[in-house]
């Protein structure tokens, strides 16, 4: 192997990341449905000719960690004679994908001689994947047949750069809003073709052999960085458990566990997820890619060091799974409709909590869970567009961030499986869909208290305009809150209600489907993140700022943090000293 040139390595890694960002911006600006062009629920990446993840830039980790490599290997298995101009549509949860609602476009990249050099992959959460209900997420699905999603196991969708219309005709016949889906599909293909073109242009500038050498050296360097980061973790082995709410298909609360072993001298972390329930008769089973990603994301979340996320760094985390496990490798026809959300979040939580138990300055508390009523699947007919059907997934307010040893929970965190997702623009959503958002606000005293506190709950209310609206949600965290660690407190649980035309609040279950009439509102309180460390160790200036911002009330500051502070954020230090020295 040639000697490593650090400057060239930095330049080419930045150039490859830049290509992925161009793909990302192309999809973000050209997709039609709000879940992609507003919430940004998608990822783009570049893989080597050996099917190794090189760059995912600003990705959603649950989409881009592990999955792309498994997917591209499967594409090459069933299509061994790849050609320039090919494109494949893939979403099979049994062949490397996350869940059926994440549609992938895979495009191989060739040099002038016809040698396969790279692969680009674009994965996006589509608003409608053909499910038996108007939602791309179905908790109650007994199996993949009940779920009803269209499954595309590495199906060729373009040859010589031209669409193969067979698949498009099939989807037009099964998807409720085919115009939106087809627009999103072509935006994904466009993003992949941008990646293909940019890699060809980069190769014309530096040469394919130079890019091949870069790929090998970049992965080796990233693995070395990860080894160094693991060397700074405390050695040990811990098991952590958490509890998932009962939801449709799961009649009792569900225990989820992980055992984590850190071997700093070897630069290896092992995550064992095998001690978990068998596949469930509902849509919450994980796929192989999401289960493996849980272990890796939990480890990455737990470390202070920032390392490149690619096949090199990820190779230092070994995730143990078993076949037929709900947090493992599913057996067909188990439904994996929610494979990127509920059990995924709980599994990542127990990994980062187990690491937190090894010592200070490691790990994280639990994040709140996903898909509250403010993140519902909505559907109906739009009276503004002649009754045209619509299906959408909104992200109006999900604040789930967990506290870490170094920072308070991130209010913009959409659980712990996501990276660069956005909260929807109210104005854009109201253009997309016939509804009105009445309220978005932080809920005081909801965050898990601690030396570093979790993110607070968000209170959201919305109602349909001009026609009924169907909303489907499935909120874990209504009964079992996100736990704190090392003395930190749990975050607040989720709550959801229907506000009647008279203004009365009717409680709703954690998972439900309702038809809202104009004048009725869906009311959502999202689950909050857990805290890290004892609340009594939180700095006075941080507490004063939280009170000034309205995140913590003076009463909670006194009772939980043992600080005397007025509503303006002025701390009475003498009274605080007396309070902290008095019996609790």
Image (cartoon, rainbow, N blue to C red):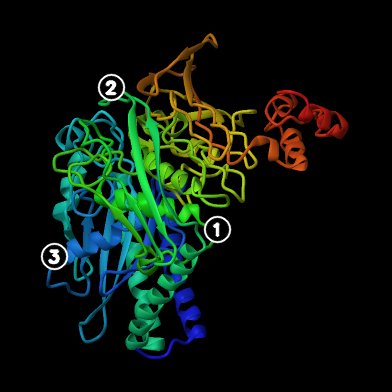
Tag 2 near tag 3, CB within 8 Å: no
Task: Identify the residue at horizontal 28%, vertical 44% (top origin).
Answer: 101
- Name the quadrant of the N terminus: bottom left
Q: Which mark is residue 304?
A: 1
- Give the distance between the C-alpha atoms of the residues marked 2 and 3, in whole angstroms: 40 Å
- In this rendering, the answer to whether 321 lies above or below 195 is above
Residue 220 position in % (x across, y down): 39, 76
- In this rendering, the answer to whether 373 lies above or below 17 is above
Q: What residue did someone put label 2 on?
A: 251
The first of marks 2 and 1 along the sequence is: 2
Q: What residue did someone put label 3 on?
A: 77
The first of marks 2 and 3 along the sequence is: 3
- Name the quadrant of the C terminus: top right
The first of marks 1 and 3 along the sequence is: 3
Task: Identify the residue at horizontal 53%, vertical 10% (top origin).
Answer: 504
Q: Secondary structure under badge 1?
A: loop
Q: Is residue 284 visible?
A: yes
Q: How many marks?
A: 3
């Amino acid at each position: 192997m040639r000697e490593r040139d650090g400057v060239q390595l930095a330049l080419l890694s930045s150039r490859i990341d830049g290509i992925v960002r161009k793909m990302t911006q192309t999809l973000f600006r050209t997709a039609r449905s709000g879940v992609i062009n507003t919430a940004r629920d998608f990822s783009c990446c570049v893989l080597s000719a050996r099917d190794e993840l090189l760059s995912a830039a600003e990705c959603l980790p649950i989409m881009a960690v592990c999955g792309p490599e498994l997917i591209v290997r499967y594409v090459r298995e069933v299509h061994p004679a790849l050609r320039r101009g090919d494109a494949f549509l893939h979403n099979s949860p049994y062949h490397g994908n996350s869940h059926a609602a994440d549609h992938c476009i895979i495009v191989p990249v060739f040099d002038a001689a016809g040698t396969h050099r790279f692969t680009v992959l674009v994965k996006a959460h589509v608003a409608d994947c053909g499910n038996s209900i108007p939602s791309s997420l179905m908790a109650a699905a007994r199996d993949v047949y009940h779920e009803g999603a269209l499954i595309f196991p590495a199906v060729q969708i373009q040859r010589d750069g031209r669409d193969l219309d067979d698949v498009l005709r099939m989807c037009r016949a099964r998807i409720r809003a085919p115009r939106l889906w087809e627009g999103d599909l072509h935006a994904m293909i466009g993003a992949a073709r941008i990646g293909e073109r940019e890699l060809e242009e980069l190769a014309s500038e530096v040469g394919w052999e130079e890019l091949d050498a870069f790929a090998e050296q970049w992965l080796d360097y990233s693995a070395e960085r990860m080894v160094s980061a693991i060397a700074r973790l405390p050695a040990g082995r811990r098991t952590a458990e958490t509890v998932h709410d009962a939801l449709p298909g799961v009649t009792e609360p569900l225990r989820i566990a992980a055992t984590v072993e850190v071997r700093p001298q070897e630069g290896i972390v092992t995550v064992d997820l095998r001690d978990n329930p068998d596949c469930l008769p509902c849509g919450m089973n994980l796929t192989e890619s999401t289960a493996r990603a849980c272990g890796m994301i939990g480890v990455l979340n737990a470390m202070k060091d920032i390392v490149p996320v690619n096949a090199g760094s990820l190779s230092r985390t070994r995730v143990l799974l078993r076949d037929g496990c709900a947090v493992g490798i599913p057996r067909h026809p188990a439904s994996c409709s929610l494979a990127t959300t509920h059990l995924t979040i709980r599994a990542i939580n127990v990994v980062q909590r187990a690491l937190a138990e090894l010592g200070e300055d490691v790990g994280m508390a639990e994040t709140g869970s996903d898909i509250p009523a403010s993140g519902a699947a909505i559907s109906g007919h739009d009276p503004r567009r002649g009754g045209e059907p619509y299906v959408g997934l909104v992200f109006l307010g999900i604040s789930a961030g967990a506290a870490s040893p170094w920072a308070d929970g991130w209010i913009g965190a959409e659980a712990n499986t996501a990276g660069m997702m956005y909260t929807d623009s109210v104005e854009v959503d109201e253009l997309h869909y016939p509804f009105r958002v009445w309220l978005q606000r932080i809920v005081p005293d909801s965050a898990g208290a601690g030396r570093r506190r979790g993110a607070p709950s968000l209170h959201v209310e919305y109602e349909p305009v001009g026609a009924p609206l169907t909303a489907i949600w499935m909120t874990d965290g209504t009964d079992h809150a996100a736990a704190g660690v090392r003395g930190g407190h749990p975050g607040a649980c989720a709550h959801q209600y229907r506000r009647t035309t008279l203004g009365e609040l009717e409680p709703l279950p954690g998972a439900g489907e309702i038809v809202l009439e104009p004048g009725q509102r869906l009311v959502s309180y999202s689950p909050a993140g857990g805290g890290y460390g004892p609340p009594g160790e939180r700095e006075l200036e941080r507490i004063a700022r939280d009170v000034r911002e309205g995140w913590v009330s003076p009463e909670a500051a006194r009772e939980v943090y043992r600080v005397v502070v007025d509503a303006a954020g002025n701390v009475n230090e003498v009274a605080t000293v007396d309070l902290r020295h008095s019996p609790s």
